[in-house]
Image (cartoon, rainbow, N blue to C red):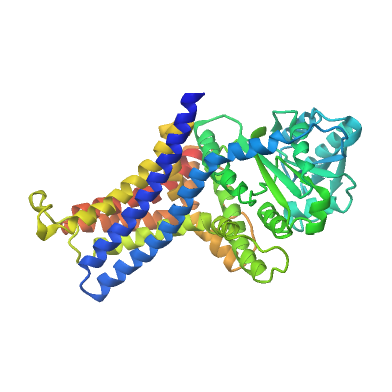
Amino acid sequence: MEKKGKREVFGRIFAVVVFAALTLFGFGFSAYLIYNANNMYSYFLAFSYLILSIVAGLFNTFTAYSYYRSYLYDEYLKKIQQNLKPVKKFPKVAVAVAVFNENSNEVIKNMERLLELEYPKDKINFYMLDDSTDTQKASAVKLASLKYNYKYIHRTDRKGYKAGALNNLLEQLNEEYLAVFDYDEYLTNKKFLMELLPYFQDNKLAYIQTEKRYKKHTFFSDTIDLFDAFFFKFIQPSRALNNTAIFAGSCGLIKVDSLKKIGGFPEYVIEDTFFSFESDIHGYKSLYVPKVYALGKPIESFTELVKQQWRYNYGDTQFLGYFIKRTRHNTKKALSPLSNVDYMTHGFGLNYISVMLVLFTIISIMIVFSQLPIAQINLSNIFTSQYISFDLELLGMGALFVSIIAPIIITKIYFNSVKKGFMIFLLNFALAFVRAKAAFSAIFRNKYKVIWDRHSKNDKYGKIIYAIRNSVFEIVFSGMLFVFSIFAILINNTFGGVWLLWYGLLYFSTLIMFYRYG
């Protein structure tokens, strides 16, 4: 236990050092560009890179702060637990599962498992919220609901998506608490209600979110599990210390009275984030319990991940506008500066990762073909006073290197896997344009919909066609980078050529992911 504790401390310190290094590298390379600028073009490059570095520096600083601060959460939670008393008077609880044209066999299996929750049977009611348009699937779920004594509620439209289904249920509820589970989550800890309800001895507590994880299956699906685990392991605990823990849509418990006073779930694509924010504004408390009570269905294909990330970033971009507007007209509780930062960074989060990657790539192209003396200095005169500015150029290469090894080493420390760390690094580039397009769709208020080709892809030829159709933009962009790379090498800028070649391969990974993982 002591050894694990030391590794945890080292991991937090290492994360802080990595993000600090990335910030310093960015500012150092910006200084190098400004130092060598001698015309309008080079000044434009230098200050563009500086602006990007300032934005990246702010995010890196906040991320480092969150990583380190999350280490304090265990002690914070222990202090709360010391004052808890076991539940003696059992309140009525509603357990709700929302479905939409899902695999009925999987839904039924998880419905049956939820019945095993440890709680007085006369104090718990189960609800199946079915928005399915597939009559065969809806019929199967309805029959299972009758069999397992779930109250079956079917809507003929999907107004408000999942939030609309939950709000429709809210109008009918007379239970005191609402537990929400996704259709694909298999209960692994039957003490969910018995362990969480005591926390509500704090009358201001509106909801509790637990840790969400996926079942183990393949290398790809296990990597996606870690992809999401970073949020629940590091970001969520840090946010919880500021009372901004995000309700993640399922595996959570909500006080019904608080939910009704808030006005129900705001009907957006990611209703959970909006609900969390409204809860905070209305003066309620939230809590995060870093314990797994149910495991979700693993994400098996890259297409599934793309759809998830599209929905997340579409919703996060909506939330950013909602947050700005709502904060401006807020007449209730004034949020603390840290809380405001938490919500802002959440809204910007995926946009920052995707848009910044693309912008840094574009600036890199412009740098390679500028007149700055990149990679044209012999080793013998690097450290002479005449070329001392080249030392700053090394910072640019260092930033690229650290950005590669950071997720790899952090994943190794916490999850004991180097390969999955590198996969996570690749996925951020493979998803960059998907996330960016989702953000623009939200900004221009395009109706949310799935846009990925679903044609047969079972044979090798079909898989290639499928991958190409769904990554045309990334193929064109990476192809452009490959051409620029060759051109840079032809004009004796070897470093610049390799730099652009590497970026090209990173964006080309979208095609590879679609082909390899479907």
Left or right of residue 351, residue 295 in this image: right
Q: Is residue 278 above or below residue 98?
A: below
Camera sees residue 243? yes
Image point 82% across, 49% down: which residue? 256
- Outermost residue, left direction? 380
Give the quarter of the image for residue 389: bottom left
Q: x and y percent of residue 362 in the render?
A: 35, 62
Residue 469 falls left or right of residue 290: left
| Residue 137, placed above or below residue 475 | above
Q: Is residue 34 left or right of residue 465?
A: left
Comparing 374 with 82, the one in front is: 82
478, 338: nearer the viewer = 338
Residue at the spot 72% in from the left edge and 39% down from the top edge: 183
510 displayed left or right of 278: left
Q: Position of residue 488 (x, y in %)?
A: 22, 58
Q: How many numbered circles are shown? A: 0
- At horizontal 7% and vertical 49% (from top left) the residue drawn is 380
